[in-house]
Image (cartoon, rainbow, N blue to C red):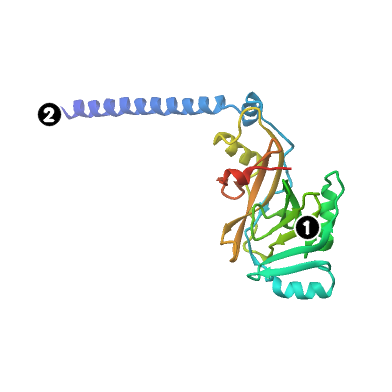
Amino acid sequence: MDWNRIKTIFILTFLVLDIYLMYEFFKLNDASQYEYSTEVPLEKRLKADEIEYVELPKNFIKDMYLSAEPIDFSNEVTESVEKTKLKGQKVQVNSSTVLNSVLDKPYELSEKYDKAEINSFVKNNVLYGDQYRYWKKEDNIITYYQQFKDKTFYQNSSAELTIYLNDENNIVSYVQTMLTNIEELSEEEKIIQPLKALETLYEKGSLKPKSKITKVELGYFNFVGEASTAQVLIPAWRFVINDKEDLYVHAFEGQIIELPTEEKTIVE
């Protein structure tokens, strides 16, 4: 047996194999580089679809989970009546966490709808009224949501103020819920930036061509817990589309927070 010949054949075989593998490696590498270089930046894709957006927030880098629980209004009402905060109101507390109030006489508003007037009523006639933020008006119903460190508890039925108007558009009653014992659950973590959240909405088809993003802000969504129990709240990006629709993105994990269609709609 010619061992030298066999050895030469093996060497040539492995050499050819090495050359082939190197060829395949460089071909794949070139392809990936080409794919990377030809990927169109998000800004250009949005422009091509005529999607506009306001200046995005830049001052939010980190955030954290929160825990909270519904307030027991029973003691709050007794103390506040004594301090005349609820003077001129017939107040009833249901299940300890829902406050119903009917005004002795309607709170008059000017003919021209003015949010400042509503804000003044809330601040001066509602328990912890300065912790609530105007949300929307639909027919004769005005909705506010509670805030924490200037961030809103989005679509949270345990942190909601619902104001009712009569046919003359004057305030006649309201229903209030509120979260208390709000605590920061974890160390601060990095959140995704609004441009990345916007990209998620775009790639998932939530942003239609010619849409205009009219507002972008950071707030909190109830992640764990029923309305009547303790809650875990997550930071979430809110995108207002054409001043008519709300879209939300989980600020830690980046997925879209799905809502029923009627809860996405904004009515002024």
Q: Is residue 206 above or below residue 220?
A: above
Residue 172: mark: 1
User: Do the numbered discs 2 and 1 sit on residues whose CB atoms are within 8 Å?
Assistant: no
Find the residue positioned furthest to the left. Answer: 1
| Amino acid of disc 1 | Val
Q: Position of residue 267 (x, y in %)?
A: 70, 42
Question: Can you tell which quarter of the image residue 229 is in?
Answer: bottom right
Q: Nearer the viewer, residue 22 or 30?
A: 30
Find the residue positioned furthest to the right. Answer: 110
| Residue depicted at 85% across the width and 43% down the height | 112
Q: Can residue 150 be seen from the camera position used here?
A: no
Image quarter hosting the N terminus: top left
Question: Can you tell which quarter of the image residue 264 is in?
Answer: top right
Question: Can you tell which quarter of the image residue 22 is in?
Answer: top left
| Residue depicted at 65% across the width and 42% down the height | 265
Residue 128 placement, left or right of 26 = right
Find the residue positioned furthest to the front. Answer: 167
Q: Nearer the viewer, residue 222 or 14?
A: 222
Mark 1 element type: strand
Q: Is residue 77 above or below residue 241?
A: below
Q: Position of residue 104 (x, y in %)?
A: 81, 64
Residue 258: mark: none
Q: How far apart are labels 2 and 1 at the CA level?
A: 108 Å
| Residue depicted at 64% across the width and 26% down the height | 44
Q: Which residue is mark 2?
A: 1
Q: Nearer the viewer, residue 46 or 42?
A: 46
